[in-house]
Each structure stands twice: as C-alpha cells, then as structure tokens.
Amino acid sequence: MLLRMSTLFLRTLREDPADAEVPSHRLMVRGGFVRRAAPGIYTWLPLGKIVLENVAAVVREEMARIGGQEVLLPALLPREYYEASNRWTEYGDSLFRLVDRKGADYLLGPTHEELFTLLVKGEYSSYKDFPVILYQIQEKFRDEARPRAGVLRGREFHMKDSYSFDIDDEGLDRSYALHREAYIRIFDRLGLKYAIVSAMSGSMGGSASEEFLAETPTGEDTFVRSTGSDYAANVEAVRTPAPPALPIDGLPAAQVHHTPDTPTIATLVDHLNGAGLGRTFTAADTLKNVLVKTRAPGADDWEILGVGLPGDREVDLKRLEAVLHPAEVALLDEADFAAHPYLVKGYVGPNALLGNKHRYLVDPRVVEGTRWVTGADTPDHHVVDLVCGRDFTPDGTIEAAEVREGDPSPDGTGTLYAARGIEIGHIFQLGRKFADAFELDALGPDGKPRRITMGSYGIGVSRVVAAIVEQSHDDKGIVWPRAVAPADVHVVGTGKGEQIEVALRIAEELRDRGVRVIVDDRKGVSPGVKFTDAELLGVPTGLIVGKGLAQGVVELRDRATGERSEIPLDSAVDRVAGIVRADRG
Ligand code: ATP
Ligand code: MG
C-alpha cells in the first residue's frame, strides 16, 4: 500500500471542531479520518476507512479461529419478526421505523437476533447440525437519545454481531467461553486496556453476561473494581452482600414520635438526637422510602412501588431502571399522592404500602432483625424501632441504592472503587428467549425435538476505533498501535526538489517489501506543516528525507516514544522494514 499525500483525499484541520468534547472525536475529525454527515452519523474518509478495516480484520481472524462463519444479513427488516420477539415494542424510541410504499412497517436493524434465529431455523433441523456460530460486520441503526463524541455513540455504527446456536446448556457455555477468549485476543491485539465486567443483560433477558470496557476517563460507563481482587462490575450489576439476620428477641417495641419540621433525613436525625431517646442516631439508622411507579411494556397502567433503603444512601436511578427493565420507571408526582391519600408525603412508612397492597422492596442491607426510624404514615410523625421481620415484612429486596467507594466488594475481598470505561464488547447467553419466540428446534438423537439455546455477542467496531484513540494520543495527535494504524511508515519529503523524489523512491521500495506507506510528496508545503500533519495522523514510524540528504542521511522517528535518530540513506529501507517486521511479530 502506498498513499501519496499530494493526491490523498484528505484535509487536516488546525482547529478543533466546535462540537467535540472528547479527544477521539477531536483528533479523528482534525486528522480527516471521519466527517460528520448528520447528528450521530459519520462518513469514513480514506484513512478512517483503512483503520476501520484493520480493526475488522483482527475481529475476522479471531472469529474464524473459534469457527465463526461470516454472513451478511439485511439491515432493512420487516416489523413482523420484531413483533414476534416483542422488541418492536421494547425498543421504544431507539428504533428507526419506516413504512414502505404499500404501507407495511419496517425497521433498520439495531441488532439481529430475530433474523439469525430464523436463518438457522430455515437451514438446520438435526442435532447433528449443531453447534454453529454465525457472525456479520454490518451497520447498525439506533436512534440514540444522546448521540455523542463522534463515532463513540453514533446513530449509525459498525458492529460485529455473532450468534451461537447450541443443542444444550453445556454447548452454550462452550460457545460463550470461546467468544470470551476470542474477545480477549481481539482487544489484546488491538492494544486496548480493558476490564471485563459482569453486566445486566437489559432487554435481552438471559443469564451470563459480560461487558468489555475500555478504561478511559471519558468513558460513559462507570464501573467498580475491588482493591483486593480482580472483581470488576458494572454499577448496575453490583449485588450488595446482605449482612446476616439479627435476633429479634429483646428488641424494644416500635414507638411513634411527634417529629414536626423534619422534612429531610438531616433534620430528622437532629430532632431525634435532641429528643433524649438515650442513644445517638445517624442517617444510617433511618429507613427512607422512595416511591416510584412502574409500567410494564405495552401496559396502560402504572403500578406503585415502594423502595426502602438506609437513609444515608441515595437511590441510583440507573440501577433501579436496570433491575426493573423492561418496565418503565417514574417518580410519583403530586397527582399520584392526591390519588393515594394514605401515602403521606415525607412520612411514608412500610405499612401504608404493604397494607394497601403496593409492592414494597428493600435494600439487601435491610435484613430481619434490623431496626429503623421511618415514616409513621401520619403527617409530622416518625416511628422508632420499627423492626424488619417483626413490624413489617417486605416483599423482597431490590438493588436500587447507590454503590459507594469503600463498600465491601461482593466477592468478599477488598472494597470497591470507581473507574470509567467505554463499552467495546458485550457477550451474553441469551438462552431460549429467541428460540422460543421463533420455535427453533432440532431433532435430538432420540427423535424428539430439542429447543436450541443461543448466545449473542457484539463488538462495536467503529466505537473501538475511537476507544483506541481515547487511550492512545498525546497533545499533538493520535498515536496508533501498528495493528490498526492507517500505515506503517510516514515518509516525509521536505524541500523543493530531490528530497521529494528520494522520499517517493524510498516509499515505493518499502511498498514493494510489503510495508504500508504514506508519503508526503506535497510540493510547496512547509516542513513544519508536514511534521504537524504527520504527528496528527499518528503513523507509528516516521522517516524524514530532508536537509541531511546531502550527507546521505535521513531521520527515523518513533511516534510513540518521540525518539529520533539519523540513519544512512542506504540502509533506511532495510531498517524500516525490519522495525515493521519485528512489530508484527
Ligand atoms: P451502550 O450501553 O453503550 O448503549 P449497548 O449495551 O446498547 O451499548 P449492545 O447492544 O451490547 O450495546 O451492542 C454491542 C456493542 O455495540 C456494544 O458493546 C458497543 O461496543 C457497540 N455499540 C452499541 N451502541 C453503539 C452506538 N450507539 N455507537 C457505536 N457503538 C455502539
Ligand atoms: Mg451492551
């Protein structure tokens, strides 16, 4: 490969685009890798397309290694398949929907479980046909609420999506493990620093599910790690360890107290501590009851849900939404309180909820035998020593409380701290959700039909490009790892005459040796501009043919380390080819 800057379809920019918040967006636009076409929709220019294909090539090699077979499904899909899986409804506003000339509904595929399931159903029918892993690399469409950061969160983006089909659960475990290994190899080869976190599987349902998060301060996903082990998890997936239950015998009886002007936990705690109750209270002794309403997909009615949690913790709405998904969640409004007068705002206790048949779920720390200060379901009154398991029995537990730095790690080792990342891949065991929806069966050895079990596995190929830039850049530009770089070497000819000719000759020799080359053969462009562009574009090796030519030397530059050295012109091609070969291993 040989790209000549004099004719390359590329205009680099000196200024940051106004809408760019993160380094990858800034640098990919300035370096002419992508151009915005519409919100969340990007064009890939020649250098960007090369990088995108380099990432895809690594993905393809590793998918092939685990026996994945590449196919290409349509992106334009009829509504009926997504009706069958209920995702026409579940996807809500994120789905791009359209209507054909006959009035039939279509959508642009956000992910392809439905059609892959139907595809396999159409071709395979015996247990002997399985297992099979199919994948594609294709544009996906999602009408994201907040497209942002260039190709990091696009409305049209490139995804590798694969699907495994197995005859039994052990098979699914194997297919899942194969993908996990393939993903580790892919992201290692791409030079990414990442964590594998257990995830909630959202609208997919199913059990085992892990996300690969590229660690960067600009990541949208917060996740937690343990100080004492390699435990890492999405905040949504953190399971609060429940303390052991306590004995109820001997606990004082619950007592209602007049607590005027205590609308907040802090004012309540102050009041209690001034009331001479013989002990000191903190916010953690109070049981805060947060009221929300939930609505199942497609349902008309909202249902009230009470969430009880220690008063020193806030509800984390994202965690709450994740556990209640696919139901919608909203806070109660004034009209809801007016319609349910037994719910006394600011003084709601467990019993008004339980007594009126509303679901009441508590934080896992609220175990049997714990005693609480909480609302007495009367204005200006709280109850002290309301004991869980004696005075109220919740309907169950819920993970709705915020996770805090310093909380014990769920695996029992160390404490949690926060990190940020970009979700670059996701693997999960779908189980039989889609096989059930489409009745995907195979005849077993006993002649009886067996329901197939599936996994689905995504990599955001376009997002990965941006994630690499997030992790690998400096104040001058991008620093591509060689595996994905748009070229191996950037040969720069400075000066007016001979240098450019020599640069071109070197570039051709390198190309003939299998090295991928960009050569800056532009005339009338200053050396300063050429060097600035080279740094911005981020090709790993630079070779400058400049003033030294008269003495028979050229300059070798390493983009990552910034090292520079003069080397004889005669050996330059050998030297560069050697560096590239060594890097490729
Ligand atoms: P996110 O939580 O970031 O919205 P997701 O969980 O909805 O992602 P999946 O359905 O798991 O995404 O899709 C598989 C992969 O596709 C993700 O791991 C991510 O790398 C990529 N991806 C998802 N949405 C986008 C997007 N809007 N733009 C670019 N890549 C995306
Ligand atoms: Mg995901």
Image (cartoon, rainbow, N blue to C red):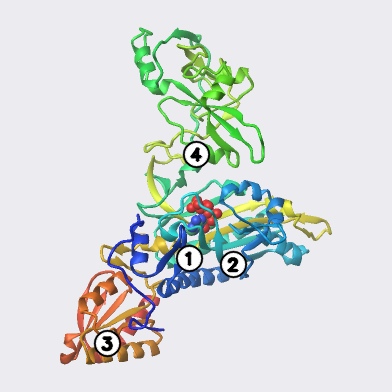
SS at circle 3: helix
First reached walking from the N terminus: tag 4 or tag 3: 4
Type of the residue with mark 1? Ile
Residue carrying label 4: 319
Q: Indicate the position of residue 497 as horizontal and vertical percent values.
A: 22, 91
Question: Image point 43% across, 72% down: which residue?
Answer: 45
Closer to us: 270 or 146: 146
The one nearer the camera, 142 or 583, is 142
> Which residue was labeled with disc 3?
572
Task: For the residues labelled 4 and 3, say whether their Cβ atoms are less than 8 Å apart.
Answer: no
Q: Residues within 10 Å of mark 4 (few under 14, many from 20)?
A: many
Of the numbered discs 1 and 3, the one sitting upstream in the chain is 1
- Residue at the location (50% across, 9% down)? 253
Mark 1, residue position: 186
Q: CA distance from mark 2 to mark 4?
A: 32 Å
In this rendering, the answer to whether 584 lies above or below 468 is below
Work out whether mark 2 precedes mark 1 in sequence or the reverse, and give the earlier one.
2
Residue at figure coordinates x 46%, y 68% from the top left: 43
As measured in the structure, the alpha-carbon distance from the residue carrying label 1 to the one carrying label 3 is 32 Å
Looking at the image, do the residues carrying marks 2 and 3 touch, with CB atoms under 8 Å apart? no
> Can I make out residue 585 in this image?
no
